[in-house]
């Protein structure tokens, strides 16, 4: 066999007394192809998997698409048609099999496939696997395979034109996004036509693998395993499904086993010709102790090995292994005493779990450039700030297998949207048919992952209809509501429930959940805080005022923008771009008035940078947007976390806080906490504290300071609050107060300190709201639990006594790595360390420095030195920018 052919041949053991060999052959067609445009004026080598933009850049036809204004300069790429071509050698051995399939795991998007000059099929959905029978078209010697891709922009426009009965809005994105129109008419990554945080790069390509599969008896396409727990029987079962492509009716025996749990089942079966789904149940031995999968912070993530073998007589025709994780999930929507509406929270293995995390968008405009290292870095960054959940947002892509496997291993729960976002969609038969296949394939691919705890039909489309985003005339509203129910309820929901009974399904986000269903699937107010999940954004109200936030059951989107750091922007910009008011800064901002909104929000509490040096003023402004974002999201997240145990005026029992958004798709202002390239913003460093398992939350209400103790831990605790007042001009506390030890039940938020601020300050002697700030932490009988938090008694712009701290820094290296020792002459707020383009992260950053000395470690992601770090290290505090 050639090195490009992988044979799967199983020689049966002598135990069975067999000498037969069963073979299937898989031949990868990945690697070097050729790529050309419609008129042949551009012709170049191209990697598969890959896309047109990546190939053009790799061969030097275009610059970095992310550089300056290239997203607009390179619009022509998406308006052309492109053809991928490869030549491979056929053989009589390949054609001797009864069935030979040409398999595409992912084609982006509208294409026709030709083999040896004959069309074998078409594709119209980026999210589907396609296979075409090609046995009779193969030749000995050279075989030529062409995949001709249509311009996705032109294709979407033509589909829109063909849909003449009524409009399906939105026609185009807002002008500020500089995007393309009619993305809702093509089944591809919706954000590839632009979004309010990302560029317009309508990609084309073979974005996943291509191969030939040849077999005589049958081919196993997919195995899935879903554990289910019976409370009445106190027993686990594993529902095993085999998706099989059989040449002819095949009778056989299936052996399912999990040796570590002493569980095995032998079942008779029959595989019918063609593609069939075959379901089996493995009963887990009740005498075996099953170890459960838990979210990050609640336990471990053990897995078991499931072995599936199939026999035809004594011939082994199927042999595969897969991981099985045991966990149960329930979405609890039930009445709450003292509150109208219903609860909305997830119970994992019978335990209510507060979801702490963020929203995930595509990690790159070009999916072939999302490497395993990129995924590991981003997901590890989530785990390292105590996140236990991510929402895979519905305008991107169903992520690659590795993403979900890493979430399984790291204990990250996944709220999985289907890929429909901020739009209405057509319901023609051909559109619905490709969507149905998409849904079935994706659910079958993903349902074995314990990390996925819920499916959600779309992003914000219920809200779009309910609050009339698209100005639909009243007489036409019924037609759009009917289309909505047809797509998400009668098709997607029905298919999901047929394929997967192990986890809940939500039709939209935000939604009122069970209440939306009662109201015909589109609630009058999908943002009602008494039900379901809520998306909430406000850029003009004061983000430090907790009264502006909805006391919702579950906050699945909220956030504020900031700019990335200068070292992230520098490679894609030039000197003339380094101004907040430059054309570049305006071009990168895809949210209407976003740059101005950041400054207006920052100006509520901070003095804005005023350096006469243009570059310093620019970098200081980048810094102040990150300070603003971090403090705003901190305030809102802490409000949601302290609202988990109480009902106030009928609202509360918040059980989830997923801010928008975790990651970036390019170098630009956005709501992310991690910059493109993996650098943590100040917000992500803040998340280390505001997502801590044990957290003190302080706020004022009616002039009284309250401190809550929030605990995600299972055991009951006894905690006290320790509150200290500091003068802005002195590094020594003015006074310290301690409350009594008070009970804090496991998984709750409880008040542990309450005192009027006026009385507290009077007891401190020389403190006023303008001259002092407060810090506080929690203690049990053994010492401090959780991080130290802060509460500003006035806006820092009004603080009296805040001085330039003149911080000095010394970089050192020891066996543990690199450390930076800081020395400050005075109180320093929002101390920010930056080492330019040296990739890595600090153990802490953006902090309030209330000591003369502090040491921070630095984890470098490439080889560096004390000299390099010292050369690039900058230290900025709030008082340094004005």
Image: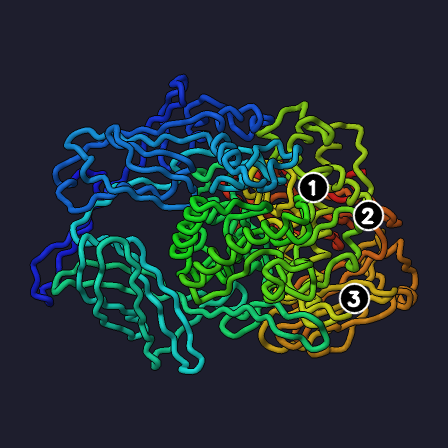
Q: Which residue sits at x=58%, y=26%?
A: 72
Q: Which residue sits at x=12%, y=43%?
A: 96
Q: Which residue sits at x=42%, y=60%?
A: 449
For marks 2 and 1, give the one nearer the viewer. Answer: 2
Q: Which residue sits at x=72%, y=76%?
A: 338
Work out whether 548 lies above or below 822: below
Give the number of the disc on residue 723: 3
The reply to whether callout 3 and callout 1 are in contact (CB within 8 Å) is no
x, y percent for residue 848: 73, 52
Instruction: Name the foreground residue: 690 vs 185.
Output: 185
**Horizontal arrangement in the rendering, residue 507 relative to residue 59 (left or right):** right
Disc 1: CA contacts within 10 A as few (<14), some (14-19) or many (>=20): some
- Gap in Å between the C-alphas at discs 2 and 1? 21 Å
**Horizontal arrangement in the rendering, residue 147 relative to residue 593 (left or right):** left
- Gap in Å between the C-alphas at discs 3 and 1? 28 Å
Q: Which of marks 3 and 2 is nearer the N terminus?
A: 2
For marks 3 and 2, give the one nearer the viewer. Answer: 2
């Amino acid at each position: 066999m050639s090195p490009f052919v992988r044979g799967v041949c199983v020689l049966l053991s002598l135990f069975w007394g067999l000498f037969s060999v069963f073979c299937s052959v898989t031949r990868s067609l990945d690697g070097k192809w050729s790529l050309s445009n419609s008129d042949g004026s551009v012709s170049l080598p191209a990697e598969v998997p890959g896309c047109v933009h990546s190939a053009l850049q790799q061969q030097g036809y275009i610059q970095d698409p992310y550089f300056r204004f290239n997203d607009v300069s390179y619009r022509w790429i998406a308006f052309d048609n492109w053809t991928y071509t490869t030549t491979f050698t056929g053989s009589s051995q390949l054609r001797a099999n009864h069935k030979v399939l040409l398999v595409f795991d992912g084609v982006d998007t509208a294409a026709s496939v030709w083999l040896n000059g004959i069309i074998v099929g078409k594709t119209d959905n980026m999210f589907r696997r396609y296979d075409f029978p090609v046995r009779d078209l193969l030749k000995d010697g050279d075989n030529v395979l062409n995949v001709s891709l249509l311009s996705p922009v032109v294709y979407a426009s033509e589909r829109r034109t063909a849909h003449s009965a009524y409009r399906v809005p939105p026609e185009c994105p807002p002008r500020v996004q500089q995007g393309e129109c009619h993305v809702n008419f093509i089944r591809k990554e919706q954000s590839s036509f632009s979004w309010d945080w990302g560029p317009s790069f309508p990609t084309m390509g073979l974005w996943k693998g291509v191969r030939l599969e040849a077999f005589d008896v049958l081919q196993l396409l997919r195995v899935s395993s879903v554990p289910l727990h019976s409370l009445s029987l106190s027993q686990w079962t594993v529902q095993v499904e085999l998706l099989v492509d059989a040449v002819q009716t095949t009778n056989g025996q299936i052996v399912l086993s999990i040796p570590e749990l002493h569980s095995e089942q032998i079942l008779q079966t029959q595989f019918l010709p063609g593609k069939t789904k075959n379901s089996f149940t493995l009963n887990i031995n009740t005498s075996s102790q099953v170890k459960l999968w838990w979210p990050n912070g609640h336990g471990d993530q053990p897995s078991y090995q499931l072995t599936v073998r199939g026999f035809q007589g004594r011939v082994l025709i199927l042999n595969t292994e897969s991981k099985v994780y045991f966990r149960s999930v329930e979405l609890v929507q039930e009445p709450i005493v003292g509150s109208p509406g219903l609860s909305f929270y997830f119970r994992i293995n019978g335990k209510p779990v507060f979801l702490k995390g963020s929203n995930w968008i595509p990690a790159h405009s070009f999916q072939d450039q999302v490497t395993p290292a990129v995924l590991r870095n981003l997901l590890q960054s989530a785990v390292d700030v105590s996140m236990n959940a991510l929402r895979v947002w519905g305008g991107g892509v169903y992520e690659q297998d590795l993403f979900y496997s890493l979430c399984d291993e790291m204990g990250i729960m996944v709220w999985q949207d289907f890929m429909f976002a901020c739009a209405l969609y057509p319901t023609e038969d051909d559109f619905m048919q490709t969507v149905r296949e998409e849904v079935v394939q994706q659910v079958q691919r993903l349902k074995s992952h314990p990390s996925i705890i819920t499916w959600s039909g779309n992003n914000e489309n219920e809200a779009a209809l309910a609050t009339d985003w698209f100005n639909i005339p009243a007489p036409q509203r019924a037609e759009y509501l009917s289309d909505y129910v047809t797509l998400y309820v009668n098709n997607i929901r029905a298919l999901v429930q047929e394929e997967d009974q192990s986890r809940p399904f939500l039709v939209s986000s935000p939604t009122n959940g069970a209440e939306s269903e009662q109201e015909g699937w589109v609630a009058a107010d999908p943002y009602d805080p008494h039900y379901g999940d809520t998306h909430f954004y406000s850029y003009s109200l004061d983000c430090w005022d907790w009264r502006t936030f909805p006391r919702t059951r579950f906050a699945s989107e909220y956030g504020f923008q900031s700019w990335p750091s200068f070292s992230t922007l520098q490679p894609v910009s030039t000197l003339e771009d380094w101004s907040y008011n430059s054309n570049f800064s305006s071009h990168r901002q895809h949210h209407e008035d976003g740059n101005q909104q950041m400054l207006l929000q920052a100006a509520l509490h901070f003095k804005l940078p005023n350096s006469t040096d243009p570059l310093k003023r620019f970098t200081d402004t980048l810094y102040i947007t990150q300070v603003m974002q971090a403090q705003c999201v901190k305030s809102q997240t802490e409000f949601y976390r302290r609202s988990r145990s109480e009902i106030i005026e009928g609202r509360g029992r918040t059980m989830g806080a997923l801010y928008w958004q975790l990651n970036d798709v390019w170098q630009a202002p956005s709501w992310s906490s991690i910059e493109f390239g993996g650098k943590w913003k100040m917000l992500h460093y803040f998340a280390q504290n505001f997502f801590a398992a044990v957290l003190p939350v302080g706020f004022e209400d009616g002039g009284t300071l309250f401190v809550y103790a929030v605990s995600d831990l299972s055991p009951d605790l006894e905690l006290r609050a320790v509150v200290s007042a500091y003068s802005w001009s002195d590094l020594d506390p003015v006074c310290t107060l301690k409350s009594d030890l008070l009970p804090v039940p496991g998984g709750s938020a409880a008040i542990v300190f309450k005192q009027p601020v006026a009385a507290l300050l009077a007891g401190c002697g020389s403190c006023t709201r303008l001259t002092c700030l407060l810090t506080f932490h929690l203690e049990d009988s053994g010492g401090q639990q959780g991080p130290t938090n802060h509460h500003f008694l006035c806006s820092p712009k009004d603080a009296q006594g805040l001085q330039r701290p003149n911080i000095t820094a010394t970089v050192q290296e020891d066996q543990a790595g690199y450390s930076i020792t800081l020395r400050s002459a005075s109180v320093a707020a929002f101390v920010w360390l930056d080492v330019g383009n040296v990739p890595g992260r600090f153990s802490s950053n953006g902090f309030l420095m209330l000591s003369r000395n502090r040491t921070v470690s630095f984890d470098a992601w490439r080889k560096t030195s004390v000299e390099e770090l010292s050369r690039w290290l900058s230290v900025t505090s709030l008082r340094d920018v004005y």
